[in-house]
Image (tube, helix red, strand yellow):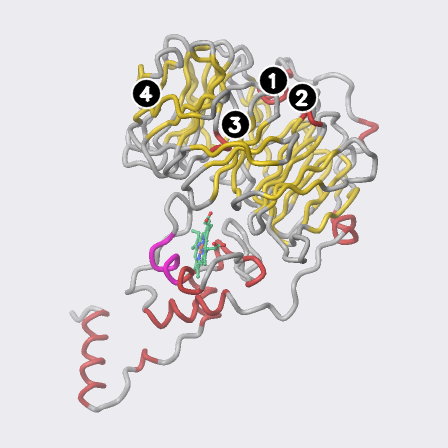
Amino acid sequence: MPTTRSVALAALALSAALHLPPAFAAPPDPARLFTEHCAACHGGDRLGAIGPALLPENLGRLKPAEAESIIRHGRPATQMPGFAADVLDDAAVTALAAYVFTPLPAMPVWGEAEITASRILHRDPATLPAAPQHGADPLNLFTVVEAGDHHVSIVDGDRFTVLDRFPSRFALHGGAKYSPDGRFVYLASRDGWIAKYDLHSLALVAEVRAGVNTRNVAVSADGRVLMVGNTLPHTLVALDAGDLNPLAVIPVADAAGNGSRVSAVYAMPPRGAFVAALKDIREVWEIPWGEPGRFPVRRMETADHLDDFFFDPPYRHLMGASRDGRRGIVVDMDAGAMVAELDLPGMPHLGSGISFSHEGRTVMATPHLREAVISVIDTGTWTTLRRIAMPGPGFFLRGHETTPYAWGDAYMGREKDVIPVIDTRTLEIVRTLRPAPGKLTAHVEFTRDGRHALVSVMEDEGALVVYDAATFAEVARLPMRKPIGKYNVWNKISYSSGTSH
Ligand code: HEC
């Protein structure tokens, strides 16, 4: 029986014999190719979904030749796959690369009016109960983001039971954020929706669409303001944390008017300000939340584009990593100037860094997305104290004030199923756990008291595996649909040094 391939070859041979161009050499139709191969992740209208928007306005410093290379080879450490030549030939790749640099007939407008009109109030805030309606410790709950079927689970951190499970908007960003009292959780989805959920009544309170493509949301330490960082449009959006009404839409651009996507926005409690990392311009922005209705921007120029931040515990210094992954820089937030360079090879994932004390010094430790090491840096001298060899390049690292152990992963390596445990006193790996052999396993979070560590088996038929943090014995296993992240209320609101904020 002839295969499709042999028929195609026969047709090719025939057309060559007749000196006719082969039938499938017609110029590729990029819109059709895009719908077939790209739209599921990048949106039918190129406005983004799980993958970013692919518009000239949003491709920043990317060059068409680089876009072609990304389409052929994918992007390591992300969900962007490579397309083999028998799926997309050279002509198709070139046509698609040109297509993503073609402007849309009209850019979507998403300003204050659209944000306000999108708001949905699910519960009248006046009717919310004064006390928790469940028997669990309200400060030892976990919000678990299940990417497999776009759900969120609320887990009791003492009994390890699921108190509620509800559908989320499409593709939540992992990082759930809490109000300072731990009562409300705020969730951001890639398509711009911000949801507010009440942990007392286990109910959704309100939602608003703050952008077309969104990176993340931060909560002010006084609990009054949310700041949303968008990649489309190029804006930061301040929302009233109470009712999610917009307070301000801040255009993100440099002095010359060049717009930029926001890489991430964080809260810096001791400074009373948000700080934003910007993808396309060499600036870091500090925006205080203390003046009602006003969000003045303090711009700090940086030597490089910074993608990812870490702060020393007093929030005096910001450590940033450049996307090219070749170095890190340290910015003194008071002076607004760079004070040191960090020796950080292999794409540090500073957003997952942790702080702890080692031989009397405050150090920070960070995994690297491209090198199988954890770098341990002395935050007094900004020198590298140790490179801990890991079983593979990792994504996350977690510790807790009550335990000497820091838990990593080998997410980017070949052995994706291991959880290496490091003793922070010796900076050596003392244990390697394998909760689900052969399955991608990563992202650890401790309970409030640090006695248990929850690990994610990040597969569609995945699980949350609970370990005794001192004996490393398995205590419980909860089935979950690709639990990409889990966030303990107390560890987040107390700004535990063992977790990202
Ligand atoms: C399974 C999901 C998925 C599919 C299918 C997919 N992409 Fe992507 N793509 C992504 C993600 C996620 C990223 C962001 C990677 C990162 O974080 O750098 C990305 C990034 C890109 C980038 C780089 C954008 C930038 O700002 O640097 C280009 C260009 C791109 N994709 C083109 C395509 C094209 C063309 C197709 C179809 C032939 C396609 N992608 C199919 C998920 C996907």
Q: Secondary structure at mark 2?
A: loop
Instruction: Name the residue nearer the viewer: 314 or 381.
Output: 381
Q: Residue furthest left?
A: 1
* Helix, strand or loop for the magenta stretch, by majority: helix
Tell me the residue that label 2 is attached to.
182
- The amino acid beneath tag 3 is Lys
Tell me the residue that label 3 is attached to.
486
Q: Which residues are magenta?
A: 68-74
Within 10 Å of disc 2 (Cα), the crowding (few <14, some 14-19, many 20+) is many
Q: Earlier in the sequence, mark 1 or mark 4?
A: 4
Q: CA distance from mark 2 to mark 1?
A: 7 Å
- Pick the quarter of the image with the N terminus: bottom left
Q: Earlier in the sequence, mark 2 or mark 3?
A: 2
Which quarter is ligand 1 in?
A: bottom left
Q: Nearer the viewer, mark 3 or mark 1?
A: 1
Tell me the residue that label 4 is attached to.
433
- The amino acid beneath tag 4 is Leu
Tags 2 and 1 touching, CB below 8 Å: yes
Magenta-drawn stretch contains 154: no
Tags 2 and 3 touching, CB below 8 Å: no
Q: Is residue 464 visible?
A: no
